[in-house]
Image (spheres, grey):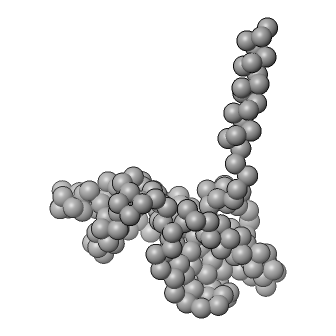
Amino acid sequence: MKISVFTSALLVLLTLISCNSEPSLQKYFVENSENKDFIALDVSPNILNLDKAKLSATQTEALNSFDKMNILAFKVTDKNKAEFEAERIKVNTILKDPKYQQLMKFGSGKDGASISYVGTDENIEEFVVFANRKENGFAVVRVLGKDMNPNNIMTLLSVLKESKIDMEQLKPLQQLMK
């Protein structure tokens, strides 16, 4: 009897501790992935259609550090401008958390973009690109990986130039660009 009471109390305590009420990008993605105003997309490294035999060791290492990319985009319309502004503020608030270290920011006012990361300089877990324009909407891109570093990202960008990207996976984003 004492063991089951102790076990129950321990389970309740662990549940309460694990329920983190702080906003995070991951929670934001999950909460909005089914929202009709958002376009949600998960992209795997397969989208690049690369001939891995032609990659250098550095390029292979960079590609192997990349797990997936999550994209969440909000398309603004005449009917949802107030919601757009509220959602944009939510994302900006999440990105102000100290765990998101900003690398660069460009643009001004309500149009612009920022690049942030989570982790250390030599072990980046996540890169976040947030771009918004009041006429089109905004997009948040999470690049997830293991042991990523700035060199890997720069190498991956150079590999992108050589890739034959599978545009079929990106078709839902075309709605946002129209």
Residue placed most toward the observer, 78 or 59? 59
- Indicate the quadrant where residue 76 lies: bottom right
- Indicate the quadrant where residue 32 lies: bottom right
Residue with the most extreme bottom position: 108
| Spot occupied by residue 54 in the image (x, y as percentages of width and height) | 17, 61
Q: Residue at x 70, y 48 (%)?
A: 20
Q: Is residue 148 above or below residue 106?
A: above
Q: Residue at x 77, y 75 (%)?
A: 86
Residue placed most toward the observer, 77 or 10? 10
Determine whether, in the image, residue 12 is placed left or right of residue 176: right
- Looking at the figure, which quarter contains the C terminus? bottom right
Q: Is residue 29 above or below residue 162?
A: above
Q: Residue at x 31, y 64 (%)?
A: 152
Determine whether, in the image, residue 79 is placed left or right of residue 154: right
| Spot occupied by residue 48 in the image (x, y as percentages of width and height) | 36, 63
- Indicate the quadrant where residue 13 lies: top right
Q: Residue at x 74, y 18 (%)?
A: 6
Quick check: can you spot residue 134? yes
| Spot occupied by residue 40 in the image (x, y as percentages of width and height) | 61, 62
Determine whether, in the image, residue 135 is placed left or right of residue 151: right
